[in-house]
Image: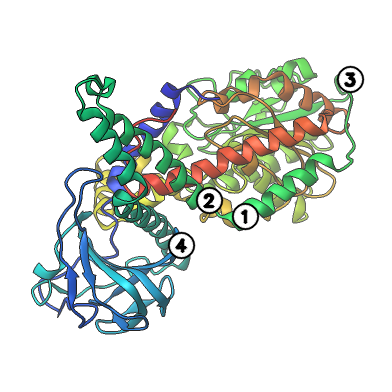
């Protein structure tokens, strides 16, 4: 289990991006256009009054005296970013641009779909009893009555016409709105479940003899409620269909019979000459040793001159090898690279690695080439090997072993993607690209590593037949969850390690990884692991993935996590 300090450090990094993502909006509103209108002509029975404190009385919007089935219309033109159920009630949110959102809560029937564009006055729902209408401007609740007939909007709602980016933007916004509606439910319950409890605590604390007088009981209760509600938010954010399906798959993978190699089996180094291509990950550079330096390939029989480090600037990293010793490295195109080179287009880096594999193969005919990649380097390895072998490239690849490869994208990249897609942050990114082009915020790789980006869309690309491919993940990896590392055409291994931020970078040095290298070079199946341990390890890795997906939604919604136990 992760210590609280490490998790808070992890969350605090994300909150920097999360704070920016609160500005998400499809476009800017102009000063002229269609004026905002009420969603219904029925009587208002409860007017706007911001609650005093977390659980105090108040109203973040307007409550109308609607009857079952009364029509509700859009207040202005906008794009539907949420339309569905939260905590058993139906809600809709429309983004009108310029930071303006309207929400329609406790409706009886929804007439629109997520992603649909509506005009002012378009029917969007049929009301339930106790319809609630809310309005937010730049993330703050405002009194809708002060905006009706005054605030005007005329927006361009498609700043991201590319379907993939637009869908990803709407997905992030949907998560944000789910959290808002859960918060609305919590505040409304202040006079119910939690309100009664809080009232009892305040009453008990008012007596002179009560020990509750010497502690801040309401604050303690509020903290407990917040912690409980955080669990509700996380649980509600999870996709239960996915949970059931993936959980069944974890059980199946744990119990199914499979070939494996017992721990007592001793293997030696291959007798023939082999060349190893090593591919480090994001933010590595040729100036320093990468994470893959922890993997001692020399102990597996490779000659020093036959261990080639891929350069993100093209070719290999120069390492001082003597070109006359007969090895592969001295004859190959070389270049140094910086961290910025790793942050470019993933597709371009795949092409560069494929070119290196072809060059090494051409200069060393008949020699088997093995490829070892970590993190982003693992993703490049799978795609480049598929290109040079699967398309009749004629390159002889023996072993392709990837470590913590984001083969299905990484959930945390959704936070960066959400921030980048906002109108405000897009302007910031444009400035950064000019002033500091090497900055991570301007990195193409961030988009590419998203589940909806290049990594996600290429997840079906399999290792070719004839290549002994092994993909290794870790149950405790917080950067690339072990459940996202599986690759088609590979033996997929998830090693069980404690959860921690250091796990991702340390993985190439783990004994379990070294053992898998030995087995792969001997063309033996991966190491045997008991069924129960496989079950626990798979569930743990999947749990990390799902909590990160939920966490991405929380950050994008601007929810500040003060503590995680």
Q: Is residue 133 left or right of residue 324?
A: left
For mark 1, does the 10 Å Cα neighbourhood hold few (<14), some (14 to 19), or many (20 or more) residues? few
x, y (%) of residue 467? 81, 42
Q: Is residue 379 left or right of residue 420?
A: right
Residue drawn at x 30%, y 71% is: 131
Q: What residue is disc 4 on?
A: 88
Q: Give SS at disc 4.
A: loop
Work out whether mark 2 precedes mark 3 in sequence or the reverse, and give the earlier one. Answer: 2
Q: Quick one: label 1 or label 3, which is nearer the N terminus?
A: 1
Which corner quadrant holds the C terminus? top left
Residue highlighted by disc 2: 238
Q: How many residues crowd mark 3 within 10 Å: few (<14), some (14–19), many (20+)? A: few
Could you tell which of marks 3 and 4 lies nearer the N-terminus?
4
Disc 3 from disc 4: Cα separation: 58 Å
Q: Are marks 2 and 1 in contact (CB under 8 Å)?
A: yes
Query: Image point 15% across, 62% down: which residue?
Result: 48
Query: Given contact means CB atoms under 8 Å apart, are the residues at marks 2 and 3 in contact?
Result: no
Q: Name the residue that disc number 3 marks.
A: 267
- Please tell me whether residue 353 is drawn above or below residue 119 in the rendered image: above
């Amino acid at each position: 289990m992760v210590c609280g300090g490490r998790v808070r450090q992890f969350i605090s990094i994300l909150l920097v991006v999360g704070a920016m993502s609160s500005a998400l909006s499809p476009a800017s509103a102009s000063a002229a256009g269609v004026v905002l209108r009420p969603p219904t002509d029925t009587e208002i029975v409860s007017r706007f009054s911001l609650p005093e404190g977390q659980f105090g009385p108040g109203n973040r919007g307007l409550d109308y005296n609607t009857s079952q089935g009364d029509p509700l219309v859009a207040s202005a033109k906008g794009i539907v970013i949420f339309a569905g159920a939260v905590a058993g009630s139906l809600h809709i949110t429309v983004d009108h641009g310029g930071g303006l959102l309207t929400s329609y809560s406790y409706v009886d029937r929804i007439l629109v779909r997520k992603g649909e564009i509506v005009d002012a006055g378009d029917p969007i729902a049929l009301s339930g009893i106790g319809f609630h209408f809310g309005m937010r401007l730049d993330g703050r609740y405002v009194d809708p009555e002060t905006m009706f007939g005054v605030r005007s909007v005329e927006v361009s709602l498609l700043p991201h016409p590319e379907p993939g980016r637009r869908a990803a933007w709407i997905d992030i916004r949907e998560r944000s709105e789910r959290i808002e509606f859960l918060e609305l439910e919590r505040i409304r319950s202040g006079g119910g479940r939690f309100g009664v409890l809080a009232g009892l605590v305040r009453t008990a604390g008012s007596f002179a003899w009560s020990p509750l007088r010497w502690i801040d009981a309401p604050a303690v209760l509020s903290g407990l409620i917040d912690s409980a509600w955080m669990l509700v938010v996380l649980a509600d954010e999870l996709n239960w269909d996915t949970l059931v399906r993936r959980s069944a798959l974890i059980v199946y993978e744990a119990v199914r019979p499979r070939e494996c190699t017992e721990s007592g089996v001793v293997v030696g180094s291959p007798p023939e000459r082999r060349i190893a291509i090593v591919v480090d990950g994001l933010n590595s550079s040729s100036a320093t040793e990468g994470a893959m330096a922890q993997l001692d390939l020399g102990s597996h029989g490779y000659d020093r001159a036959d261990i080639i480090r891929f350069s993100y600037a093209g070719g290999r990293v120069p390492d001082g090898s003597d070109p006359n010793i007969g090895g592969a490295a001295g004859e190959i195109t070389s270049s140094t690279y910086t961290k910025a080179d790793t942050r470019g287009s993933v597709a371009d880096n795949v092409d560069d690695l494929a070119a290196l594999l072809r060059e090494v193969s051409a200069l060393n005919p008949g020699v088997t080439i093995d490829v070892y990649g970590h993190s982003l380097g693992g993703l490049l390895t799978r795609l480049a090997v598929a290109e040079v072998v699967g398309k009749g490239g004629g390159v002889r690849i023996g072993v392709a072993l990837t470590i913590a490869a984001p083969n299905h994208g990484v959930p945390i990249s959704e936070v960066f993607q959400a921030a980048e897609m906002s109108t405000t942050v897009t302007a910031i990114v444009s400035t950064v690209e000019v002033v500091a082009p090497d900055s991570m915020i301007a990195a193409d790789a961030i988009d590419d590593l998203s589940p909806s980006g290049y990594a996600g869309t290429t997840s079906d690309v399999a290792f070719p037949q004839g290549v002994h491919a092994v993909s290794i993940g870790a149950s405790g990896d917080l950067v690339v969850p072990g459940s996202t590392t599986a690759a088609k055409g590979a033996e997929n291994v998830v090693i069980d390690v404690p959860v921690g931020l250091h796990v991702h970078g340390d993985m190439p040095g783990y004994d379990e990884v070294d053992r898998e290298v030995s087995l792969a070079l001997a063309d033996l199946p991966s190491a045997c692991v008991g069924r129960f341990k496989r079950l626990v390890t798979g569930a743990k890795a999947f749990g990390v993935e799902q909590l990160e997906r939920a966490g991405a939604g929380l950050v994008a919604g601007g929810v500040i996590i003060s503590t995680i136990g």
